[in-house]
Image (cartoon, rainbow, N blue to C red):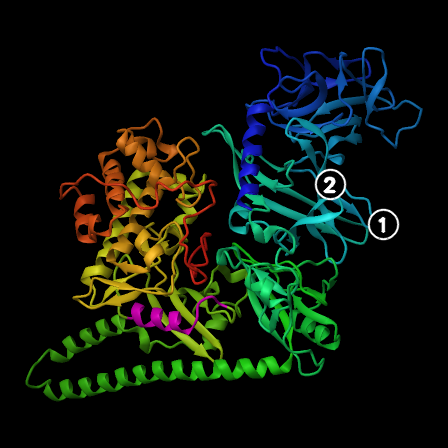
Amino acid sequence: MQICKVLMLMLHTTFFFFIIPTLSIQYETLTTITPNDSIQGNETLVSSAGTFEAGFFNFADSQLQYFGIWYKTISPRTYVWIGNRDSPIQNSTPILKLTYQGTLVIVDDSGRIVWSSNLSTITEKPVLKPVLSLLDSGNLVVKDGEKILWESFDYPGDTFLAGMKLKTDLLNGHYRSLTSWKSIEDPSLGEFSYHIDVHGFPQLVTTKGKVLFSRGGSWNGCAFGGVSWLRNLKLFKFSLVFNDKEVSYEYETLKNETITRLWLNPSGFAQRLVWSDREGYWEIISTRPMDQCEYYSSCDANSICNITNSPRTCQCLEGFVPKYYEKWNSLEWSGGCVRRKRLNCTGDWFLKHSGVELPDTSSSWFDKSLSLEECEKMCLKNCSCSAYANLDVKSNSGCLIWFGKIRDLTKHIDQGQDIFIRLAASELDHRRNKWSFSNKKLAGALGGITLFIMILGLAAFTYIKRKKLAKPGMLKIFHMKCKREKEDVQLSTLFSFSTISKATNHFSDCNKIGQGGFGPVYKGILEDGLEIAVKRLSENSEQGEEQFKNEVMLMAKLQHRNLVKLLGCSIHQEEKLLIYELMPNRSLDYFIFDSTLKEKLDLAKRFQIIDGIARGLLYLHQDSRLRIIHRDLKTSNILLDNYMNPRISDFGLARTFRGDQDESKTNRLMGTYGYMPPEYAVHGSFSIKSDVFSFGVIVLEIISGRKNRNFYDHHHNLNLLGHAWRLWNEAKAQELMDDLFHGTTIPCEMLRCIHVGLLCVQQIPEHRPNMSFVVLMLNGEKLLPEPSEPGFYSRPVHHPIQVESSSRSCEDCSQNEASMSLLEAR
């Protein structure tokens, strides 16, 4: 798989360096073509605003001549459409002509037609005034007055532009599709097709020949499910027309200045690219397939694929077991999973799976008018029905039903949807017994603590009231103390489930703001107007009761301006909820790794964030009543308030130390690759220096605007830490700065941050400073020693998304490296 990814990058890089036509050619530009005109030689047709250009070209070291369209001002040249891709002209001077019938033809020196637009609506009679022009959308159009006779958008190549439509005719089955090139330098028809499959409920697919290669998901009311919602929906508006005659899909940019395209490369990867004027290159914001889970049915039937669980990416759905145990245990997923208990048709029930990309819908049934409750009843009536879900996540409406095996179910990287999988009644009895005991135990413990606090408070109140005549003013002081204790100990705040359900509009998908291993996160508004964020422990969460209790107990005792505030919790039957104050500016990674949003973080703001995180960690390690190791510090667990002040969140993996304890070990490796220190990833040892290492990684990411896990220095075979270390040794530390600040004067505070970051990520834990020294060093109150080599920097990293991993099993590692907006669970 990694080899495939490397090849993909090599192809992508080669594309931009080798698809360069013969240089030093001066083109003569035209704006329109009539039957009396033609295009040949160095003549080109240019759109009115100068965005696109069309003409003849040849690839480097090639005599084959093609007529195509490219971006006029972007270099190296990027082609978006080629007319005669399968019939290039060789050893001849091609000419493009427009006939009086409105047909485009390319002829060679002898006048032989080698390509034609084959306009089926044109008869032998000439039209009134056919005119060829190139629009600023990239669409080559033949018009007769205002009537469009022919347009290139009806015949896409390997590029999907804004305003273009992928359309499938439901009457005759014909469809438009993107088709890949045969190779980087051969634009002839390749073996991959990207189109809408209308068998069952429509979904975007990539096929290799007749074989399904990858799915882009089904339409969910906002977009096709396979897109990365949090990134794409900020930049584009997707729309789908779905009626009795056709299914038509298109998109538009939300900002006029955004230059974007979707490119189906020769290897079958569909890449969404956005042009960066500042950097002068195409930024890849999504690729599909990006990992093993995005290849069609990589886990086979009745299973779910979660790439963050690597190497055991495939897991049987609850209620299912591997069909071939030996193969499954050896990481061979063929055969998939089968039911542990047969369905009885009567008494069956449904288990909800949240945050998933819905499975293959090619054999599904749907109804746009049914509610989710009606959908459940419809599914129960049919003994062959195996699962159901909503069609539209915006309105929670529509019914989508699957029959037989569930194929290609994937844990979504962003928000995903809910799906309800049918199980036998006996599976429910087993599950109820299991959860009932654990919930009663947890509820009893929290209830006991709450009762104890109330009794203690009542006793103290009674005692002070008796003494108030002897000590005037004491009652007032007591009230102030009680208020502080209530703020410190929030275990007394147990919200009712109905209150939180009402506040989140019954956990509507429209209120969903994040998704992680813990489960979904919802925005809510209490009756008093207070905005909250609610983490809902999903039934199939990678986290469980231990992490839930851990976060409740720890957060109740912590109060600091740089820690997110836990307002309370709720336990109701199988439901477990954590209620936090809402952080309106989402998480740090939402800004720092976004090419547009990062502009909101100037150097002063970045330093403020770094300093705030350091002070929050100092409180955890030294100043709080408990000595706490966070163990999963990362940019997505740093939330930002109204004023962009950082708040450390997500204490599910945190551990407390005694005052004299320095280090501990674990056999259960948990955390997030890219932020783990080497001693923890390899030996399971963790201490306050583990958090210091993670903090150092975050500092370097904030400074550079690059993610440690994704960065790769091709020239020196280094990750971000190694890259920073090399620049430091070469006295070029300022080159680590985010590209936004190139050419500007770098304040000494920023260079000091780089220095501190390198000190924090040193290989040996004892060499790393503690957080009290870090805070002093950041503010210039302490001299900075020279750093030594960072951990995990010198190992070869063969691909930007390959990460350092321990040789140990890591099934319990943190599951989320995507931005989960306001509050991220793992």
Q: Decide which of 561, 791 is in the foreground and name it.
A: 791
Residue topped by disc 2: 177
Q: Range of the magenta residues?
A: 541-556
Magenta-colored stretch includes residue 549: yes
Residue under the point 56% across and 29% down: 14
Instruction: Tell me if 264 is positioned left or right of 657 in this view.
Output: right
Report the disc number at residue 701. Answer: none
Graded by Cα atoms within 10 Å as few (under 14), some (14 to 19) or many (20 or more), the crowding at tag 1 reads few
Question: Residue 666, can we see it?
Answer: yes
Residue topped by disc 1: 171
Instruction: Give the alpha-carbon distance from disc 2 to disc 1, as whole Å.
Output: 17 Å
Q: Earlier in the sequence, mark 2 or mark 1?
A: 1
Q: In which quarter of the image is the C terminus?
A: bottom left
Q: Decide which of 170, 810 is in the foreground and name it.
A: 810
Q: Main secondary structure of the magenta part?
A: helix
- Are circles 2 and 1 on residues that touch, CB within 8 Å? no
